[in-house]
Amino acid sequence: MDRLSQGHGQKNQEEKSGMSEEEKTVGEGETRKTTLARALESPPLSVRDRLLQAVRYIGRLRVDMLVQVWMPVVKQTSPQKRVLTTRDQPYALENKNDQLWLFRSASEGFEFGTEAGGDDLGLPGRVFVQQLPEWSPNVQMYNGEEYLRHADAQRYDVRGSLALPVLDPATRQCIAVIELVGRIEKVQCSSDVEIVSRALQAVNFSSVNSLETPIPEVLFFHFVDKFHMC
């Protein structure tokens, strides 16, 4: 009777939770990366949904930073123009930070060019066109032409920035840009690059920096004469 009662108790607990003890054990043992990859076993996700999964993963590991996606959209103008926008695109801001939230809102009002040679590239436009990552310890050290959100960066005290291209593994074409910004100067970014790379790999995208190859030197200095690193 005791064993029978225990069996019924275990069954009732499983029914309440909706999971068996075996399922709980498996779930607790999974890493975040594995959880992301397992999501792909469901019906195919859209590009936006896959990027949302990646952004959530990055956001959980970089809780002090704003993580946002810039996607190309076609503006119904005459003639039509393709621009990068972060409006209605995935983003993550895990820790409540009014300044970064305001910077996110300001970023939604910007559109960047997607054609080489344009004067409206800024960042993330340069990353999208060149398909190369760009890192700055402090974006306030750019001028207004190099960083079109310069005034907002000063207003909301945004400093460290990292932007990486999101590549389609089949075509090696850039389909989006993931940007990380924070309110402290970023003198190291290799761990951030690795986190973004892992997140993108988990949802079947890639970036310029794979985990098997060195990080391009261009990532470490942009407008090198503006920065002095200790």
Image (cartoon, rainbow, N blue to C red):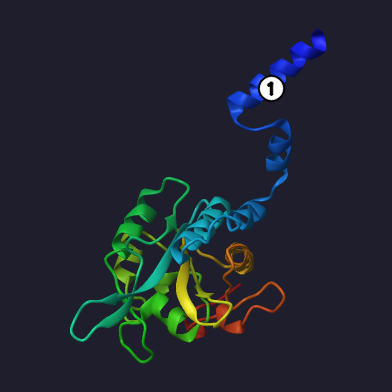
* Residue 67 left/right relative to 61: left
Of 32 and 9, which appears nearest the observer? 9
Q: In the image, residue 161 lies at what x, y percent?
A: 47, 68
Of 9 and 160, which appears nearest the observer? 9
Look at the picture and state if 167 lies above or below 186.
Answer: below
Report helix, strand or loop for mark 1.
helix
Q: Quadrant of the N terminus?
A: top right
Of 121 and 10, which appears nearest the observer? 10
Q: In the image, residue 7 lies at what x, y percent?
A: 75, 18
**The quadrant where residue 88 appears:** bottom left
Of 197 and 162, which appears nearest the observer? 197
**The quadrant where residue 172 appears:** bottom right
Q: Is residue 44 visible?
A: yes
Q: Quadrant of the C terminus?
A: bottom right
Graded by Cα atoms within 10 Å as few (under 14), some (14 to 19) or many (20 or more), the crowding at tag 1 reads some
Residue at 81% across, 9% down: 2
Q: Is residue 188 visible?
A: no
* Residue 213 left/right relative to 184: right
Q: In the image, residue 149 lies at what x, y percent?
A: 32, 70
Query: Of the residues shown, which amino acid type is indicated by label 1?
Result: Lys
Q: In the image, residue 91 lies at what x, y percent?
A: 43, 57
* Residue positioned most to the bottom: 117
Residue at 75% across, 11% down: 5
* Residue positioned most to the top: 1
Look at the picture and state if 187 lies above or below 102.
Answer: below
Q: Which residue is mark 1?
A: 11
